[in-house]
Image (cartoon, rainbow, N blue to C red):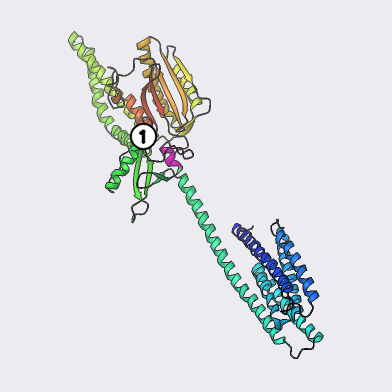
Amino acid sequence: MLNPTAISIDEERRQQNNSVFNIYSLYRLLLSLILLISFLLTADLNFLGIINPELYYRTTVFYIFFNALLFFRSFLPKLKKTEHLQYLAVTIIDIIILVLISYTCGGVSTGMAHLVIVPVATGNILFQNRMGTFLAAVGTLAAFYSEVYLSFTLERPEDFYVQVGLLGLTLFSISLILQYLSSKLSQKDLLTKQQAEDLKSLEEMNYQIIQRMRTGIIVVNTAGGILSSNSSANKLLNRDSKSGAFLNLPEQLANELKQWQEDNNYRSSPIKFSENAQEIQASFSYLQPDKKTDVLIFLEDYSKVSSRAQQLKLISLGRLTASIAHEIRNPLGAISHAGQLLEESENISESDQRLLEIIEAHSKRVNSIIDNILGVSRNQDMVPEMISLQDWLQGFIEKYKASHKDPLQIDLELAEQQIFIRFNASQLEQILTNLCDNGIRYSLKQTGKPHISIQVSLDKDKESPVLEIIDDGPGISPDDQSSIFEPFFTTSSSGTGLGLFICKEICEAYQSQISYHRTEDNRTCFRIRFAPPEQSIM
């Protein structure tokens, strides 16, 4: 399998070679023009073409057209397979033409042969392998052959083979040096690219981890402006990261940040951004403690903490209830039994009979309280399960109606899409039974009809399932609304005041919220907002 880093380096090297070859093409074109113009303007004053002027002229003219063609060809797309072959062919042709021009000028002694150094050096830069040594050999042999040919065709008092040898030594030295430097640069470039790829991969991995964290993370500047945030933070703050719904912190969170900046030991209280929103616990830390500029804000869904606390509370309550139930029920049973025996006595007056009825009623009330609390303790170890809310409600309604002798009217309104919740079915039945009993009782008392409505929907903003139980009762007075979920609070003379309290405790144990509302048509509504099904409960 090919290494992506190696592929990217090869592609970058190919682009660099193209740039080098384009510069070299421009150099060749300018060189050929200079050689021709110098020959035409100063033909009688210099050594250019002194051995064979006609051959010099034709060679330089051909060289100009050849270079012009290749220069304009460099701007057209090239085939990757033939690039190196093109580079090699052009470099060899350049060496041969420059040696030929050197021959027409008088050979190595004129210094014209040193023009071969440039194509040999360029070839070593382009190939970065032994092919560069081959080009140095071609240049040396061509210069040597040119000098030998001049020695046989001209009568010169001295030969210049030493100069040819020095030229060859120069070409090979340049070739080996450039190959060594190119090898080192390539290794360094490969290492740099590999490190860059590793850093990029690490950065991407860190980004994915941060984005998938359930803890919200926000980076803000000293003015409270949001610099960066992950998806969990956007969800907790109801912020649309794509549209940029807001660039600053919400007021409550900004106030908590200000207090922390004044006192770094300050611990933020749970924050609630709206009535139906979940509580959020914020903690703060400087991104760079030494500079104390940008601040990291960590946001935790406080419902998870409170859920665990509720579970511990229920477990403690269950253990406490189980330990004292026996101690309470024994004397309670004795009191109730004694009252029943006194009730059978023929010497009981009417006033005493009334006192016995009070004893019996309150004995049943205390027993009912114990049963309710024990019901919570018996369910404390139950685990959540994935429930299809629509299917489960239909089964619950059939079962609930069958448990009542009188006919009941229960309207069920379901959402179009399938909605799932993560809850315990037994405890969900306990909550719904309590809420439906209350709704039926108060609707019957107010209108004379046992009628309730159950509605299921999905809060698209929070992706939270919502269940509403609506009745036709008189509702709860504004003064009592803040107390309805407190233990032992009741507006009914026969109630224990634990029904709604237990419903609230169970809901919070599963990171859900139960609340009281009035509908638009002024009906009584108890709303349960469940945690998103993909969210971990335990």
Q: Quadrant of the C terminus?
A: top left
Q: What residue lies at 68% left-to-right and 75% top-to-bottom?
A: 115
In terms of image quadrants, where is residue 229?
top left
Q: Is residue 13 above or below residue 161?
A: above
Q: Is residue 426 above or below residue 32?
A: above
Percent coordinates x, y for residue 258 in the rendering: 30, 44
Residue 234 lies within the magenta run: yes
User: Foreground residue, 528 or 166?
Assistant: 166
Q: What amino acid is labelled 1 in the image?
A: Phe
User: Where are the magenta residues, as a range?
Assistant: 231-242
Q: Is any atom of residue 367 visible in this view?
A: yes
Percent coordinates x, y for residue 127 in the rendering: 67, 68
Residue 277 lies within the magenta run: no
Q: What residue lies at 27% left-to-right and 47% top-to-bottom?
A: 262
User: Foreground residue, 5 or 108?
Assistant: 108
Q: Say which residue label 1 marks.
A: 273
Q: Quadrant of the N terminus?
A: bottom right
User: Foreground residue, 208 or 412?
Assistant: 208
Percent coordinates x, y for residue 468 in the rendering: 42, 23
User: Foreground residue, 317 or 13?
Assistant: 13
Give the mark count: 1
* Label 1 residue SS: loop
Q: Is residue 110 above or below residue 513?
A: below
Q: Is any atom of residue 347 visible in this view?
A: no
Classify residue 395 as left or right of residue 10.
left
Percent coordinates x, y for residue 108 in the rendering: 71, 82
Classify residue 313 as left or right of residue 179.
left
Circle 1 packing at 10 Å, graded few (<14), some (14-19), many (20+), is: some
Classify residue 371 as left or right of residue 417.
left
